[in-house]
Amino acid sequence: MVTREEEEARQKKRRRKAIIELYKKRLGSLRKGMDLSKKGKLKEALESYIEYLNILSQFHEIPEKSLSPRHFDHKKETTELLLISQVYWDMAKIYDKNPNLYKESVRCLNQFAKFTVGFKYHFVNSEMLRKYIKSKGCNNMDAFKKVYMEIREKSGACYVSSYCFSDFHPVTIDLRRFRMVLKSNPTGQKFVDFYYVVSPVVVSFCQRYPIFGFFFKAITSPILRVCAYLARWPFL
């Protein structure tokens, strides 16, 4: 005779097996959502996106609203993390079109930021958001600008140095420290704000036109090295 506990264990095992099978097919829902979004079928796209996110939440046994990068392997699942950020980004734009769904748009924007900050693709996502704001395609402009500022600040990005050297090069690390020093006074904060407005545009231009990028690196790298050297001085 099967006990109640054994039956519950069997049912739980069957449910888990069903979720795993569903998880294997999750990218189908994602692709469908993206295709529908491109065709302008936004309501249907949302349904597919929600289905994709719900599959992820069931697999990780958490509510969809609690999905976080900590539930994923950052090395093995970088592509999945990028895809999730894109899903939340598209959902935020779709919800933004309906004034009654403002809160849901903001929630998706915050999720987009959560799955952006600290990852290799943060610059790409940041640029995508900046260009969208510049196009004035959003209704809740303040919400989109706020998230852009948060991504910019929390990412700790030093765009020019990262472009000329790398994210974890000693020069870039020293310049991040120098940035913190600058932010400690009003004038320095204004300079940092100006830098974050201009530098993504410059780096984007350099990436689009490699020849210009070559000369930009040649001119800028020595200057950055000097700034990094000064940042190591004890009085800073």
Image: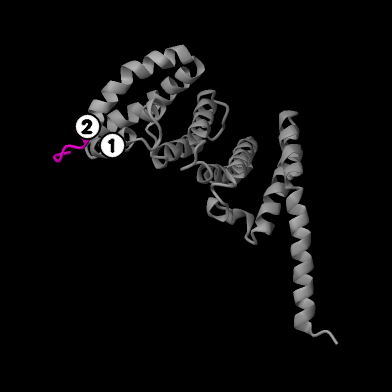
Residue 222 visible within the image: yes
Q: Residue at x 65, y 56 (%)?
A: 57
Q: Does residue 58 appear left or right of residue 218 in this picture?
A: right
State left or right for residue 35 relative to residue 159.
right
What residue sits right under mark 2 in the picture? 229
Outermost residue to the bottom: 1
Residue 169 % position (x, y):
36, 35
Query: The magenta stretch spans which residues?
Result: 230-236
Q: Front-most of 226 and 58?
A: 226
- Residue 221, placed above or below residue 182: above
Q: Earlier in the sequence, mark 1 or mark 2?
A: 1
Q: Is residue 134 above or below residue 219?
A: below
Name the amino acid, label 1. Answer: Asp
Which of 175 and 202 lies nearest the eye of the viewer?
A: 175
Q: Residue at x 47, y 34 (%)?
A: 145
How busy is the neighbourhood of tag 2: few (under 14 within 10 Å), some, or many (20 plus)? Answer: some
The residue labelled by disc 1 is 174
Circles 1 and 2: CB atoms closer than 8 Å? yes
Q: Estimate the x, y position of residue 205 in percent, counting from the top left.
A: 46, 18
Using the rendered view, name the quadrant where residue 29 is placed.
top right
Q: Is residue 233 magenta?
A: yes
Q: Main secondary structure of the magenta part?
A: loop
Mark 1 crowdedness (10 Å alpha carbons): few <14, some 14-19, many ≥20 = some
Q: Name the image quarter holding the C terminus.
A: top left
